[in-house]
């Protein structure tokens, strides 16, 4: 997800509204959601936000239990009936509590059929205005339109069927299995063949959509080709759309080569309307964009999320930087691939400027989000979750070197422990250390688990000695507040009076560290970090 400022009031309102706990969390493992939803009246004037739906939910018990709780927000949903392996239910304080027909042991599976309705209310998850309908669920929005176990680590398979008027285009996650026309209506059936987190479940529908299709060949020729679908609306800037049509295949090629083959069965992009609170949202196989937002870095950002966020999903919201930092940094990698190093550095520097100009002052990793639902205005604080996190990856590349950095990320994307599953920050760090044979706790302790950044005050003295050589002392002092010492490799550029220069690389391991050098010719000066490798810093 990429935030835009016009949506701040939406996030503030629903953050302050409060949400009860996330159901039974780790007590159950949802295996499958089979959802049927009738959207016909939502797409006909006066466009009410109410609909009827049914969800068949298959669940595995992770411990012995005779009742469960699912997330279902009372403000949005009315639960009419729960059948299957259920005897009775209550819907109170945003939880659907279901008494099961017996006690289920760890590993046993059961199924619930929930018939429910959405109220005619706006809840910032189900959007319905003037002939367009779509969902937007990150972080805890799925519970506003679908009873579910609304935590990022419980990924499940999905089948979603929707009934719409026959003049409406509809798209959801996964591949289109069927569409049948009958009596002026169309029933679409989509299936996700890979597990999906609830916050990434989505659909779009509009009578205004026009559709362009492209085919893209997987790198693995045995997989054949994949369809890329572009849902756009009349009046959008066709120059921008045509640019994206020319770039998407190249982006898919690049990221497939860099990490692993595109991991899903379909890719679609769909623009929304003025009520959409973000720039884009990376719903699995179905990216939603703000109106007319066929913007290269935005499309790239949401595309990369298909690998980092959708294929490999954060274990909890404390690990969200593994989504947004990766997606933001990969915008810069795409610019490096497409336009060269100068555009790469401009992109990373722009994120550093955003962070340094509006640093919120807290650490990237917030441990309380392991167990608590985050305030969206904090979890999507762009200076931290996006800009700082992306710059940390830039500096990690510097610390490891290109060969180790890209080899590790390719192995990460292909590791069976994470593919189509979840990862937490500790697992990611351990994996990097194991793969690169490099101790990295010091790096992540200061940049991910600690706040702020170094403030350097370098000082140099240069004197000619009696033997005719030139001696220099270079002292690095750090003066930051509300942060510890930042250990980093540093580079110096020595320029000489004769116009020549050389680079020296050192390890800055403690404060007020002095480096001593002897030169055969007179230095004109020594420049600190000439290529801006420690990009999150101030120099005073």
Image (cartoon, grey):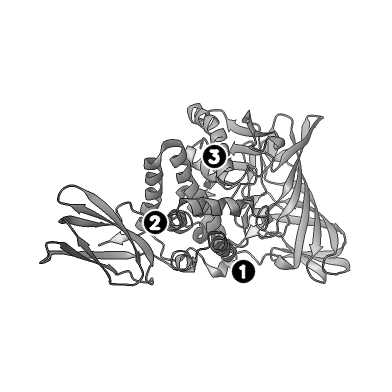
The local crowd at label 1, few if under 14, some if 14 to 19, many if 20 or more residues have their Cα within 10 Å, is few
Q: Locate residue 337 relative to residue 520 in the image: left or right.
A: right
Q: Residues within 10 Å of mark 2 (few under 14, many from 20)?
A: many
Labels 1 & 3 near each other (Cβ < 8 A): no
Number of residue marks: 3
Q: Is residue 387 above or below residue 90?
A: above
Q: At 38% across and 71% down in the image, what residue appears?
A: 483
Give me the residue at 50% from left, 63% from top: 438
Q: CA distance from mark 1 to mark 3?
A: 36 Å
**Residue receiving disc 3:** 254
The Cα–Cα distance between marks 2 and 3, rounded to whole angstroms, is 28 Å
For this rendering, which residue is in front, 531 or 241?
A: 531
Task: Read off the residue under disc 1.
Answer: 371
| Location of residue 81 (image quadrant) | bottom right
Q: Residue at x 23, y 64 (%)?
A: 517
Check residue 355 in the rendering and tell me which mark sits there, or answer none: 2
Near mark 3 (Cα within 10 A), the count class, few <14, some 14-19 or many ≥20, is: some
Whole-percent x and y of residue 445?
Answer: 47, 68
Give the residue at the far left of this rendering.
466
- Observer-nearest of 503 and 107: 503
The residues tagged by marks 2 and 1 sit, at their Cα atoms, a distance apart of 27 Å
Say which element carries label 1. Answer: loop
Q: Residue furthest front?
A: 467
């Amino acid at each position: 997800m990429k935030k835009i400022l016009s949506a701040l009031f939406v996030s503030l309102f629903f953050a302050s509204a409060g949400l009860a706990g996330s159901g039974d969390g780790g007590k159950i493992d949802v295996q499958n959601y089979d959802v049927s939803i009738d959207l016909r009246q939502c797409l006909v004037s006066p466009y009410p936000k109410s609909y009827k739906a049914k969800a068949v939910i298959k669940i595995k018990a992770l411990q012995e239990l005779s009742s469960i709780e699912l997330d279902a927000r009372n403000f949005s949903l009315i639960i009419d009936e729960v059948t299957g392996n259920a005897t009775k239910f209550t819907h109170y304080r945003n939880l659907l509590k279901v008494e099961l027909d017996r006690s289920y042991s760890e590993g046993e599976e059961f199924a619930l059929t929930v018939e429910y309705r959405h109220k005619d209310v706006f809840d910032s998850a189900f959007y319905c205005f003037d002939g367009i309908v779509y969902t937007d669920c990150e972080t805890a929005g799925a519970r506003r339109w679908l009873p579910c176990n609304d935590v990022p680590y419980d990924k499940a398979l999905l089948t979603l069927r929707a009934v719409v008027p026959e003049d409406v285009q509809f798209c959801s996650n996964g591949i289109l299995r069927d569409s049948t026309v009958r009596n002026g209506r169309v029933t679409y059936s989509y299936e996700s063949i890979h597990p999906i987190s609830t916050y990434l479940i989505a659909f779009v529908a509009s009578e205004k959509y026009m559709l362009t299709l492209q085919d893209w060949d997987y790198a693995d020729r045995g997989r054949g080709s994949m369809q890329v679908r572009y849902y756009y609306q009349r009046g959008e800037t066709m120059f921008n759309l045509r640019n994206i049509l020319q770039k998407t295949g190249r982006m898919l090629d690049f990221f497939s080569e860099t990490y692993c083959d595109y991991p899903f069965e379909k890719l679609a992009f769909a623009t929304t309307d003025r009520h959409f609170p973000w720039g884009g949202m990376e719903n699995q196989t179905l990216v939603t964009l703000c109106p007319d937002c066929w913007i290269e870095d935005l499309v790239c950002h949401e595309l990369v999320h298909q690998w980092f966020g959708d294929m490999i999903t954060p274990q909890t919201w404390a690990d969200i930087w593994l989504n947004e930092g990766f997606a933001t940094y990969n915008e810069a990698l795409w610019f490096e691939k497409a336009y060269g190093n100068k555009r790469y550095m401009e992109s990373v520097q722009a994120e550093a400027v955003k962070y340094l100009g509006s640093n919120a002052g807290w650490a990237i990793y917030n441990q309380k989000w392991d167990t608590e639902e985050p305030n969206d205005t904090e979890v999507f604080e762009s200076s931290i979750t996006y800009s700082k996190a992306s710059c940390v990856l830039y500096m990690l590349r510097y610390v490891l070197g290109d060969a180790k950095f890209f080899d590790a990320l390719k192995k990460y994307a292909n590791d069976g422990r994470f593919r189509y599953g979840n990862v937490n920050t500790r697992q990611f760090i351990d994996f990097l250390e194991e793969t690169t044979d490099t101790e990295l706790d010091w790096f992540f302790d200061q940049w991910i688990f600690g706040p702020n950044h170094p403030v350097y005050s370098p000082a140099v003295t240069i004197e000619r000695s009696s033997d005719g050589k030139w001696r220099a002392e270079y002292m690095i002092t750090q003066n930051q507040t509300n942060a510890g010492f930042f250990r980093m490799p540093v580079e110096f550029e020595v320029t000489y009076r004769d116009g020549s220069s050389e680079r020296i690389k050192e390890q800055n391991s403690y404060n007020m560290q002095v480096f001593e050098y002897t030169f055969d010719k007179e230095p004109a000066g020594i420049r600190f970090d000439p290529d801006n490798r420690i990009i999150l810093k101030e120099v005073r």
